[in-house]
Amino acid sequence: VEFRNIGFSYNGTPVLSGISFTVEPGSTAAVVGRTGSGKTTLLRLVNRIFDPTAGEVLIDGTNARDWNLESLRGQIAGIEQDVFLFSRTIRENIAFGRPEASAGEIERAARAAQAHDFIASLPDGYETVIGERGVTLSGGQKQRLAIARAFLSDPRILILDDSTSAIDSRTEDEIQQAMRAVSRDRTTFIITHRLSQIRWADVILVLAKGRLIDMGKHDELLSRCEDYRRIFEGL
């Protein structure tokens, strides 16, 4: 995925300006910056929730605008803090996007996402009907179902937007394992405040006021980037 001199304005207000970088296939990029720095907006350009007002996003060397939208989004999965779940069975929620998946495939995805054990403990297992937007589940359980859904859809590009911010440390450890597994061999973008996730990224992108001010590994950025040190010290 390549960003070339990206600019984006919303209602005439510049949100992103002059951003250029490349994330190699199969690698993980962490995007960090203070609230309002443009992190989420930047990643919403990948699956074309927004289109840049300047520059271009290239996926496999092709401008994202030239992709068939359905085909493009079929290769991208996103996991956000506010996981969207339907008032249907757990099986149907995991299989959203791949309704033809077999029971075995769904269970394998749930196991990979560290979700199988809690699902098996429910009265009806995978046939348990969850409440609207998953109200009967904890935050960590919702997250694991979202990761299982991503495993099952097997996307080429994965976008994780601050998806472990509201859970306890033990659940986070389990979800971290699941996220590492689901991000293996696919291009992954992470927006997070968790240092453990930032550290294992292949590259860290530092945003400030809509601009990319530095990029590199954790130790490199600590030694040379004052904004990164401030973010790091504030976590």
Image (tube, rainbow, N blue to C red):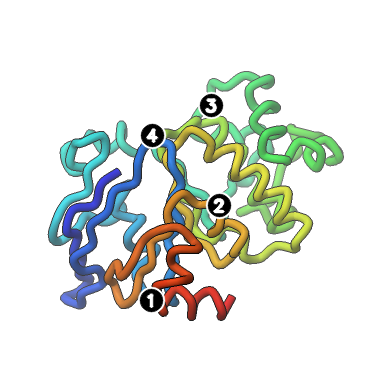
Indicate left or right for 145 with 171 as reference. Answer: left
* Image quarter of the N terminus: top left
> Is tag 4's residue or tag 1's residue first in the polypeptide sequence?
1
* Residue corresponding to mark 4: 75
Which quarter of the figure has residue 214? bottom left
Q: Give coordinates of residue 106: x percent, y percent.
A: 65, 27
Query: Mark 4 vs mark 3: which is more N-terminal?
Result: 4
The residue labelled by disc 1 is: 36
User: On the image, which quarter does residue 206 sit in?
Assistant: bottom left
Q: Earlier in the sequence, mark 3 or mark 1?
A: 1
Q: For label 4, count other residues whose C-alpha is less than 10 Å away and answer few (under 14), some (14-19) or many (20+).
A: some
- Badge 2, how many Cα within 10 Å: few under 14, some, many 20+? some
Foreground mark, 3 or 1, reads 1
* Badge 2 amino acid: Trp
Q: CA distance from mark 4 to mark 3?
A: 16 Å
**Which residue, given by chain and number where applicable, does mark 3 sit on?**
99
How many numbered circles are shown? 4
The first of marks 2 and 1 along the sequence is 1
Q: Residue at x 69, y 58 (%)?
A: 139
Residue at the location (29% across, 72% down)? 210
